[in-house]
Image (cartoon, rainbow, N blue to C red):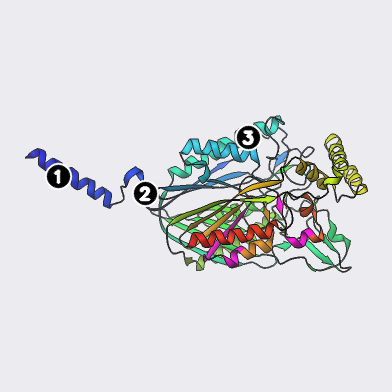
Amino acid sequence: MKKLISVILLLALALTLFACGGKEGGEKDGLYIGYGRQNIMPDMSIPTPLGGYGATDTRLSSEFMDYLMATCLAVTEGDETVLLFTQDLIQCYPDFFNGGRKAVSEATGVPENRVFFAATHTHSAPDTSKPLGENAAIDAYYDVWLAGVVSAAKDAMADQKKVTAMGAAHVETEKLAYVRHYLLSDGSYAGDNFGNWQAGTIEGYAEEADEQMVLLQIDREGQEKPIVLMNFQMHACITGGATLTTISADVIGSVRTYLEKQQDMDFAYFTGAAGNQNLTTRIAADVNNLDYKSYGEKLGNYALEAMKSLEPVEGTDLKINQQVYTGDVNHAFEDKYKEAKEVADLYKETGNRDAANAKAVEYGFASVYHCNAVVRRKELPATLDMELNAISIGDFALITAPFEMFSVQGIKIKTESPYKYTFILTNAGENRSYIPSQLMYEKGCYESHTANYAPGTAEKVADQFVQMLKDLKG
């Protein structure tokens, strides 16, 4: 009789646990989110090539202005878990991206295709484009970075707590982000990249800027401190320049520090469609504008104001739509490969950007960077794949784009998304460089000269993202 009572009690306990969320295979009942952040600073005793401005062989780190961080969100609903990283790097290049995905997956048990890396696009962080085995400083940094992202992932997994509420807001900023390609008084187009704003009077901008910030706040069970996510589109290049050697998270570090001082929160920034947008019209490649802190405060104040009037995000179901886009490679200037390689080699051997640029112009190229791109593309196949992701939680969604998207495509995706709130994550995945709009291919610009993909790709990818979001919504 006692045995029978014991069996009945055990069965009752099991049923109670099941009703309270103890599901088969450790499945969680409801939406759980965890937060982890780790320092990913390089060893400052090792001069390390910095990413951005194409000057990575001669631009070596010498000091730091603020710390680089890797932040991870662990999101679990039912038996599905995703790890979403944002990190203070310029891009996620192949060796770092693939190695990081594998290491994080092995450390956490989360499948590799559910580990998503995004970069904030600071131009003052180590050059992760260099293949491992080619540069001792980058090899040393890879070990530091890998330890940081794995640790952040473990922390996020351990920190997962049940979500009690989510709120979001659209914030219209004013005159913070500008399209960096202008229509000048003589009818020509110019851009910031080499200080071309000095060439004439700006009559207008080549395309529409996206100044909209999207904010998401996550409240969790037993936690007074919320997680706050910001999505905004800007080139993080205020503290950098082709001859400047300071390590910095740039404006992202500034807004992060400012917000967390103003209010107790765990903050994460995700770069939007910033491929053709800067924070100011007057940032040239060699100008170190130390006003980056004031820009951080401006962005932070917009966020703080928005947090006073967040609207509820309905639903907690986690959905993922993962697809591959296969596009034609840009074969422009292939007939001048020999000349392009001569210029690229000259720059690599001497580090003299002015001399290399002069030679490039002599051969009919826009710059040495244009030549570098022609050489790089020659080694690519006829078509190139890229991984596209759409992820939603209730009425909030985000897309991950492994390239620098232009503002017009970002606006299109957000406008046509069936979700009330949509983050556009660019520099998110194995880097595929710039993908300019059709207009900028026609006009010609730094981004179209260096792009991996052929004209028309941006519009096709934007359409695919919109359809992916619609399919996800159902």
Mark 1 touching mark 3, by CB under 8 A? Answer: no
Q: Earlier in the sequence, mark 2 or mark 3?
A: 2
Q: Is residue 249 above or below residue 230?
A: above
* Sequence-earlier tag: 1 or 2: 1
Q: Position of residue 60 (x, y in %)?
A: 75, 37
In the displayed structure, 459 sits above or below 242; it is: below
Q: Which residue is mark 2?
A: 28
Which of 359 and 304 lies nearest the eye of the viewer? 359
Q: Say what amino acid the circle numbered 3 marks.
A: Tyr
| Residue 220 on the magenta span | no
Image side of residue 422 versus residue 378, left or right: left
- Mark 1–mark 2 Cα distance, whole angstroms, equals 26 Å
- Which label sits in the foreground, 2 or 3? 2
Which picture quadrant has residue 294? bottom right
Residue extending furthest front?
382
Between circles 1 and 3, the one closer to the viewer is: 1
The residue that label 1 is drawn on is 8
Q: Earlier in the sequence, mark 1 or mark 3?
A: 1
How far across and down, in percent of the image, does residue 299 sit? Answer: 63, 61
Tag 1's secondary structure? helix
Q: 344 or 384, which lies in front? A: 384
Identify which amino acid the numbered label 2 is placed on. Lys
Q: Which residues are magenta?
A: 413-441
Q: Is residue 306 above or below residue 158?
A: below
Q: Residue at x 77, y 65 (%)?
A: 206
Badge 1: few (under 14), some or many (20 or more) residues near its Cα, within 10 Å? few
Q: Position of residue 102 (x, y in %)?
A: 54, 37
Residue 142's disc number: 3
Q: Residue furthest left?
A: 1
Q: Residue shown at 18%/43% (left/top)?
A: 10
